């Protein structure tokens, strides 16, 4: 008693996906690749745009702070004398008006040697700290910014404020020399909130665009696949009808040849042998009758051989494996070829009758070509079932691929392509020719 083993759900899902992938056709595959590429580009843009917006905002703030710092320097408020002094009070008032407030929570003026010459927090004034890499870049003449490292001693009094962005802008005197650095520290929360809105809007726009593109391309792909499948089913139906008509004509021809020629030949042979029996053994006409009887037998053998070939037509309920066995057995009996036949142990998937007929004709054409042209000694014929349909390979060790292809191969390829199948004839790895014919899964009616 045979036992049926069911595929696990994951394998069934993979098989269904492969079948759908084969079903959508070349246009659908290109459309799917386009949507996938668009999705990749959208993800890259979704990550890149907020980063560029953040960088642009920070650069704009740094440029604004640098402009304010240059205006303060042009008024002669920098350098500044230590407090209490009139110059320090003037600088403090100017900074309170132009820089402090809003998102800005701390302003410092650094000398090139690392001393805090001014701070809105007087506890830092006069202290010297090691300049950070960001500050040193600003001393080189370019505004710089970074997230504050609150573990540094210079940020001791800012730690309760949370994460801050520090901007360092160089301060120049009237001669253009760098005389100090303005450090402006701002809260991160407002900037992150703004960037969060930007990211949300970017992803919303990208997601909407990709969704609409996916719907459009999916609808177009489904529509195209339906048209292709309908045409393929129509081709299968028409080919099946044609083959059915040919089969009926074949049966009629076989019957006519058997009745109208085969039987008269038999009566002719019977008459020749009867006439021969009435003559003496040494009668001269008897030799002529013997020759005519031998000729009649030869004609009868030829006729019966042709009738057998004609009778190997395809029935309506064709058994693909049995048909392949008959082709192989016939080739073995009529030639010196060593032919190995391998049939897939997996149950044959459902395919249209016209497709099976086309596949049998393809295999017969391949085996016939091997016998006629390949000068081969060994042939492997194999039937494989796949998620997309059936494939038969005919691999010989003969003289290799013929060029150009003969009419039989061209006709076979056209017949297979009409029903959604394929035919490839190429050189095999060990020499000889590899013939690979594929037919698709069964479709519905036309």
Image (tube, rainbow, N blue to C red):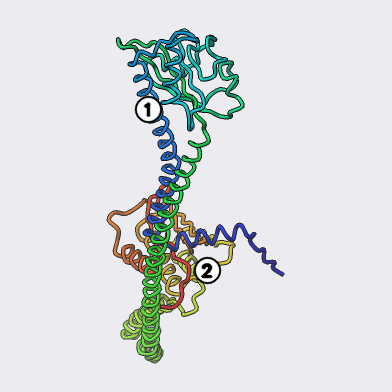
**Residue that sits furthest to the front in the current view:** 86
Q: Nearer the viewer, residue 3 or 54?
A: 54
Residue 226, percent from left and from top: 40, 69
Residue 316, percent from left and from top: 46, 80
Question: In what quadrant of the picture does the C terminus appear?
Answer: bottom left
Q: Is residue 177 above or below residue 9?
A: above
The residue tagged 1 is 64
Could you tell me if residue 385 is visible in this image?
Answer: yes
Q: Tell me the residue at 36%/77% (across/down).
A: 238
Q: Tell me the residue at 39%/63% (across/down).
A: 221
Q: Tell me the residue at 36%/88% (across/down).
A: 256
Q: CA distance from mark 2 to mark 1?
A: 83 Å
Closer mark to the observer between disc 2 and disc 1: 1
Question: In what quadrant of the picture does the N terminus appear?
Answer: bottom right
Q: Nearer the viewer, residue 59 or 155?
A: 155
Specify which label sits upstream in the sequence, 2 or 1: 1
Q: How many marks?
A: 2
Q: Secondary structure at mark 2?
A: helix
The residue tagged 2 is 321
Q: Is residue 285 left or right of residue 161?
A: left
Could you tell me if residue 294 is visible in this image?
Answer: no
Q: Nearer the viewer, residue 351 or 120?
A: 120
Question: Badge 2: few (under 14), some or many (20 or more) residues near its Cα, within 10 Å?
Answer: some
């Amino acid at each position: 008693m045979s036992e049926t083993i069911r595929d696990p759900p994951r394998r069934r899902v993979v098989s269904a996906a492969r079948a759908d992938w084969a079903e959508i056709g070349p246009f659908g595959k290109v459309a799917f690749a386009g949507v996938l590429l668009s999705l990749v580009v959208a993800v890259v843009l979704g990550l890149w745009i907020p980063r560029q917006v953040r960088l642009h905002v920070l650069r704009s703030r740094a440029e604004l702070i640098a402009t304010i710092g240059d205006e303060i320097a042009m008024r002669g408020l920098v350098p500044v004398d230590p407090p209490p002094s009139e110059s320090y009070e003037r600088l403090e008032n100017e900074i309170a008006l132009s820089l402090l407030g809003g998102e800005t929570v701390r302003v410092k003026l650094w000398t090139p040697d690392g001393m805090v010459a001014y701070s809105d927090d007087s506890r830092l004034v006069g202290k010297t700290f090691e300049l950070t890499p960001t500050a040193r870049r600003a001393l080189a003449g370019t505004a710089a910014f970074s997230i504050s490292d609150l573990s540094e001693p210079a940020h001791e009094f800012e730690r309760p404020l949370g994460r801050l962005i520090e901007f360092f802008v160089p301060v120049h005197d009237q001669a253009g020399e760098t005389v100090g650095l303005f450090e402006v520290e701002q809260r991160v929360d407002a900037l992150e909130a703004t960037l969060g809105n930007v990211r949300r809007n970017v992803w919303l726009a990208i997601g909407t665009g990709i969704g609409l593109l996916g719907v459009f391309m999916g609808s177009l792909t489904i529509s195209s696949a339906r048209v292709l499948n309908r045409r393929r089913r129509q081709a299968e139906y028409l080919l099946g009808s044609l083959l059915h008509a040919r089969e009926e004509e074949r049966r009629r021809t076989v019957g006519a040849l058997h009745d109208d020629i085969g039987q008269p030949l038999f009566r002719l042979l019977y008459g020749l042998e009867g006439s021969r029996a009435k003559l003496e053994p040494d009668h001269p006409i008897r030799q002529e009758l013997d020759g005519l009887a031998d000729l009649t037998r030869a004609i009868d053998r030829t006729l019966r051989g042709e009738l057998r070939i004609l009778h190997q037509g395809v029935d309506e309920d064709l058994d693909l494996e049995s048909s392949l066995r008959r082709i192989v057995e016939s080739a073995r009996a009529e030639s010196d070829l060593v032919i190995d036949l391998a049939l897939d142990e997996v149950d044959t998937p459902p395919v249209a009758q016209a497709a099976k007929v086309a596949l049998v004709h393809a295999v017969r054409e391949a085996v016939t070509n091997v016998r006629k042209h390949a000068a081969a000694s060994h042939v492997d014929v194999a039937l494989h079932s796949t998620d997309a349909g059936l494939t038969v390979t005919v691999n010989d060790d003969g003289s290799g691929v013929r060029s150009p292809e003969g009419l039989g191969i061209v006709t076979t390829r056209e017949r297979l392509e009409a029903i959604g199948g394929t035919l490839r004839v190429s050189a095999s790895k060990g020499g000889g020719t590899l013939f690979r014919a594929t037919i698709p899964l069964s479709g519905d009616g036309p």
